[in-house]
Amino acid sequence: MTTSVRPATHADAAHRLDLLRQMLFIRRFEEKCVELYSGGEIRGFVHLYIGEEAVAVGVNSALTPEDNIVSTYREHGHALVRGVPLDSVMAEMYGKITGCSHGRGGSMHLFDTSRRFYGGNAIVGGGLPLAVGIALADKMRGESRVTACFFGDGAVAEGEFHECMNLAALWELPVLFCCENNGYAMGTAIARAQAQTDLAVRASGYGMPAWPVDGMDVLAVERAAGLAAEAVRSGGGPHFLELRTYRFRAHSMYDPELYRNKDEVELWKERDPIAALTDQLRAAGELTESDLASVEDELATAITESVAAARSAPAEDVTTLEKFVYTPRQP
Amino acid sequence: MTVTEAGQIQTTYREAMRAAIRDAMQRDDRVFLMGEDVGSYGGCFAVSMGLLAEFGPERIRDTPLSESAFVGAGIGAAMAGMRPIVEIMTVNFSLLALDQILNNAATLLHMSGGQVGVPLVIRMTTGAGRQVAAQHSHSLEGWYTHIPGLRVVTPATLADARGMLWTALQDPDPVLIFEHGSLYNVKGMLAADAGPVDIDLAAIRRPGSDVSLIAYGGTLGKALSAAEVLAEDGIEAEVIDLRTLRPLDDAAIIGSVARTHRAVIVDEGWRSGSLAAEISARIMEQAFFDLDAPVQRVCSVEVPMPYPRHLEEAALPQVDGVVAAVRTVVG
């Protein structure tokens, strides 16, 4: 594999501050979601990404706007850092017409094809074949895009995962498989579900380069994703990253968390990717308290405004209920 | 191929289907065929015989036995702008891809708020009659008609085998084409310049005034044979070929029943929860006061398909059964 050195600017202070800002953006957005959910303003399933932010931010940072993303039901973070407008994501949480999926999808089905963000798939493993197909289309047309496909450790137990690993490797498709291994398939610990818990080993059995990455370190994720994406883009076939991470919150808002102990959660919280990068930047003298305060202020303002906009946005008229089932026909 | 003075050629259902695929491949370079044994083997039912040599392995694409992955890849490729024809060897194996068909192909347009169209065509063989027992004899097209977002078509004639595919490829939404296994060897005359046909309307294959015999796909021939038998006794059956099972052409069905005042539906699916049940309900809802007798259904007996010929014949709708059902409502 040829390794391209990332541009120096990516290591500089401004870039690192931007990575921090993006992670904070996801976290503050989701903390607001918790508040809104508790207040009954948003409903349905809401799967929080809190604790896993370094994965979305690091991977997205290694992609170009021409690349494709296929994601899961825990995708607020992927959508936001991809540039799906905050107001449209928040409006989607409210099921409003101004939502990024016209309000029809909700938290689990965020879409924005103008940013090549192909959802929000809420069947575990269900997005993998789509990513394979999008990459197949790109390859057949000679496009040099990478399709980044996010999924969790739970998906590795699905037959579809293995079908897709095989097909992508067999056809040498430009897919970057990003396995967000947070240790639990809903409430089932990985050791209780997987005979081989070293998930990169599973993927490497299909003949594709695969390796584990510290998913709590945004710079490590960005570096690994950069190498892998570059290799995929230059015709190296599919690559697989096992991004080892942890969700600090429950699986969804309905989960009483009976399956894991609080000590384990606390232990992982000590590796909070946001706190880690903040400490690192402070120690290097690259982050002042006023920098941080201004980032927080800016995010708080934007999120507050997005809530206000979503609240006042129109609800879809029920007479349009059957819209988007079939494409309107030209007479 | 000899063209008669009337501008017709002798052909088979299989050859007509192959001509349709060839024509589509020539007309649109976004079209490709993908499935198990479609290439080197020439197709399980020899539909794609010779096409690999003509179009090459990129566009006549053999897949591993991974129904979920290659159907999902077809969906992904369609989302990305290609026009895939995915061949599932038989409807029996489509169950391995049902999640992709229902949760992705039929649903993406809606849950993305109209952004993600899936212009995909899936072809598959359906039906019994070849003594291949319980796992290879299903007629599940009726199941697929339950799903909003899909269009389901059943070519029963040479003209429809030749003409439905191109129209299906022009459809912006997913179309499922069910080809009854008993039809591939059917021979007949077809216009040398036969081309695309509509995939919206039912067709009256035999006009009659005494009873509406409603059939499709593999049961059309049986309905027509029954009509000949009945004609000897002076009973004139109108035989309707549904052609498209979703959306159903209610106007054609109700129009016929309004003329004949009697209806018998011939459907190879199991009786309970069948397409025949749906049609029967629509007739009751829309033509109740036109009816002179209860609607009758001739369906498959509710048993997994047995292997012995005489038991299989007893399980399937047959001409005698159709004739007997008509006699219960006429007179």
Image: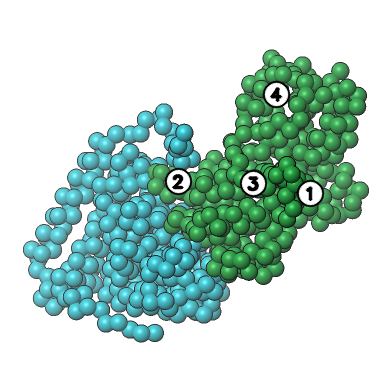
Chain colours: A cyan, B green
Provide residue B74's location: percent of width, then percent of height. 53, 58
Identified by mark 4, the residue type is Ser
Provide the residue designation for mark 3: B193
User: Same chain for marks 3 and 1?
Assistant: yes
Label 4, label 1: how far apart the Cα atoms are: 29 Å
Element marked by disc 3: loop
Mark 4 and 3 residues: CB-CB less than 8 Å, in contact? no
Q: Chain of mark 1?
A: B
The x and y percentages for residue A55 are 33, 68
> Is residue A203 visible from the viewing direction of this image?
yes
Give how far apart the Cα atoms at labels 4 and 3 are: 31 Å
| Residue occupied by mark 4 | B256
Q: Does residue A136 appear to the left or right of A54 in the view shown?
A: right
Q: Residues within 10 Å of mark 3 (few under 14, many from 20)?
A: few
Asked whether the beta carbons under mark 3 and mark 1 sit within 8 Å of each other, the answer is no
Q: Secondary structure at mark 4?
A: helix
Of tags 3 and 1, which is closer to the observer? Answer: 3
Q: Residue at x 62, y 34 (%)?
A: B201
Chain containing mark 3: B
Residue at the spot of label 1: B187
Q: Is residue B19 above or below residue B261?
A: below
Give the residue type at disc 2. Answer: Leu
Q: Residue A192 in the image: x percent, y percent?
A: 53, 69
